Image: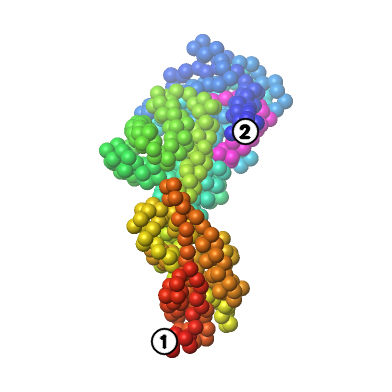
Amino acid sequence: MDRGWLRWGLLLLLCWPLAAWAGSASVRVAKLSGPPAAMGTLAPPPANADRGATITWLHAPHGRTVWRALYLAGDWTQASPPLLSIGGNTRARATVYLPPDYRPHTDTIFEASLNPTLSHHEVVYRLPPDLRADQPIYVELGDPGQTQPLRVRITDEATYRVGDLWHVRLSTFFNSVQLSMVLVIVCFWIVLRDRMFLYFIVYVAAQIVYVLAASGELYALPGAALLSPLGYHVGQCAAALAAAFSVWFILDFADLRANTPRLAAWLGALRWPYIAMAVLIWLPFLRPDAWLPNTVNMLLIVTTVLALTSAWMAWRQGNRQAGFFLLSWVPLMALTVIRVVQLIAGLPLPAWLEYGFPGSMAWAAVIITVGLADRTLQARNERDKATRMAQFDPLTGVFNRRAIMERLHETWQGGSATPEPLAVLFLDLDHFKQINDSRGHAAGDACLAAVTEAIRAELGEADRVGRYGGEEFVVVLRGDSARMAAPLAGRIATRVAALRVAAGERLIALTVSIGVAVRDANMASPEALVDHADAAQYQAKAEGRNRVVVYQPVAAAAR
């Protein structure tokens, strides 16, 4: 990869958090035992308030409600008004009471009604421009909760918009890369109809939906208001489907069943729990919010270990596609494991992981697309090889009998009302059996190869030559070559007679007998044309060999 692009990519990842947090104010957090008695009352931070930080992490527990009071470390003095942002709110309930009226606000990133001038990856509230250090902001956190803490910041609006713009650029880039790869593979699938391509399309498309839903950007799209009541369940369902279809894809793409059948069987069995979880997320009476996310996360770790182990073993056995899989998925799998551990342990989400995770998805999509193209190229090469083996003689490299007759039929039918001149040469190597018997088959093969090169040296681009059988060759001549068939055959005979093929310490002299037949109005079929050239070749043999005879219909009838 070009180092310039690498530097720009790292700068892009680093600049977002710097831009977003440069204008963040220090915020102190106090724990409350319950709802405050008078929300609109100005009061200094209580003694149990922390010392303050630019980023505050609040935990939303399951099954109970907790209250927190937020205070600025000093009065707001910046020209740009302050904004309160809450990030990481995937499913927890957070009710915010803002000054001066302290009306409750319960918003989530899944609502289409959020500020359309900002992205949806955080819930943002505008605060009074004269916010004071003794003017509290109350946050009520309750069921449903989540292990992942919420990120809370107070930032001036100008700085926040700069950071938000970086977020939009990064997210758009990563999602666009994945979507582009999906569109490429859709074209592959339309043409080739390979089920493996369909697995890739569903898996990456579900992955894109998951990333957009988890960041809230899905609900900013046109028509996404219909999905808002479904909340984070859309993303959870998409994640489970992405995992299931990624397993289907991996098994087919890397052909793991052939290289590691036992591990592939275990890996294949994990598809069905993901499918079941994609359904269970929509059944509220099972309370899936409490147990399903971490269950999916633990299953992802198991799937990751199995997939990488199986692919590694397959790659060691020479599986090229498994190598593509490892190259594409090792960064993604590493970040997936880190992300899962972060979620289960309830650790804060760092910016490098927040953007590294979708970035690794985009990387995986690109490399897998290259791998799919490589697999298609291999399949085409294998098909071409099989076609060549079916059409060409392996010893001489010219067409075999079936293929040369097919070319003759194609030329015979032509595409115009007036048939073009067409002629056939039938060549037979003289005394070939004696060469095989006295010098061996290796010497015979060398003679056939030498004769083939002599024939080719006299042919034009439109002419075709094929090995008809044993030491016999058929040459199909068109146009000017067909008009000059007899002289051309003479030049071939002369060239062959000049050959000296080494056989040990001795040289073998060769000659050929050639029959020539030219198509006329009375010729019934291509087979008849070959038969006439063969008859002329027999006449050349009868007349002493090493000569050219042109088929004469009148003479043949007289005999």
Image depth: mark 2 or mark 1 in front: 1
Residue that label 2 marks: 2
Instruction: Name the colouring of the figure.
Output: rainbow
Is there any visible trace of residue 194 in the rendered image?
Answer: no
The total of numbered circles placed on residues is: 2
- Three-letter residue code for mark 1: Arg
Question: Quick check: 172 above or below 475?
Answer: above
Is there any visible trace of residue 165 in the rendered image?
Answer: yes
User: Range of the magenta residues?
Assistant: 152-174
- Three-letter residue code for mark 2: Asp
Asked whether 279 or 79 is in front, the reply is 279
Asked whether 504 or 47 is in front, the reply is 504
Of labels 2 and 1, earlier in sequence is 2
Question: Quick check: 443 above or below 235?
Answer: below
Residue 255 placement, left or right of 412: left
Q: CA distance from mark 2 to mark 1?
A: 79 Å
Q: Residue at x 37, y 46 (%)?
A: 252
User: Where is residue 134 shown, x and y percent of the image?
Assistant: 60, 17
Question: Quick check: 550 above or below 427?
Answer: below
- In reply to whether residue 293 is colored magenta, the answer given is no
Q: Residue at x 44, y 47 (%)?
A: 505
Residue that label 1 marks: 559
